[in-house]
Amino acid sequence: MVIITLLHTIIEKAGAVALLMSEEASVDAKMLGMAAKATLATMLLVLWQGASGISGLGYTFGNMDLASSHGHSGELAFVVAIVIAVLVVKSKTDSSQLKGMAFGLAGMLFIQIGFGYMMPSMPWMGMFHAMMALGIMSHATILWYQLSKTSSQ
């Protein structure tokens, strides 16, 4: 409930609600382009998540402890996903698919962070955490493709 309120506040402060209610129907391709680039950043963060998550199993770069980097990069990916959703809404696109996928990415990352926080007390949650990462990566790839295609038109 707090996250929904927070997302609503962020979007409202960004002026997205006023933009959706305006009469103009021009889509801001620049915003969609920025959202596509932010989606690429999210995909890179998810790849880093995989590398730093595997380091917990003993595969690492030298003797580096990447556990804290794993958690922080996941939270950063969540923040970037919120920015993506705001950019898509502010672009005034009529595509409910893009809007749904943008909010879906943020929702998936929120659930993924929850799985991560549950892992110390429930180690078996790692199975869901890893499979969810694959889903997030494929979802972000499709979102990036759709955003790139829409912004170039």
Image (cartoon, rainbow, N blue to C red):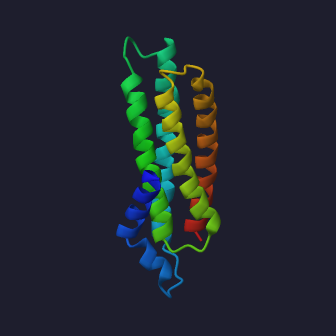
State the count of labels.
0
Left or right of residue 95, residue 25 in this image: left
User: Of residues 29 and 76, which is closer to you in this image?
Assistant: 76
Is 86 rendered above or below residue 24?
A: above
Going 60% across and 57% down the picture, which residue do you hit?
101
Q: Quadrant of residue 6?
A: bottom left
Instruction: Locate the C terminus and report the quarter of the image it occupies.
Output: bottom right
Q: Quadrant of residue 71?
A: top left
User: Of residues 115 and 54, which is closer to you in this image?
Assistant: 115
Is 94 rendered above or below residue 87?
A: below
Residue 103: % across, % down: 54, 56
Left or right of residue 128, residue 7 in this image: left
Looking at this view, name the residue that lies furthest to the bottom. 23
Q: Quadrant of residue 132?
A: top right
Looking at this view, name the residue that lies furthest to the front. 1
User: Of residues 141 and 1, which is closer to you in this image?
Assistant: 1
User: Of residues 110 and 2, which is closer to you in this image?
Assistant: 2
Residue 17: % across, % down: 45, 74
Going 60% across and 60% down the picture, which residue do you hit?
100
Going 51% across and 14% down the picture, which residue do you hit?
57
Residue 72: % across, % down: 38, 34
Residue 124: % across, % down: 60, 21
Is 16 rendered above or below residue 85?
A: below
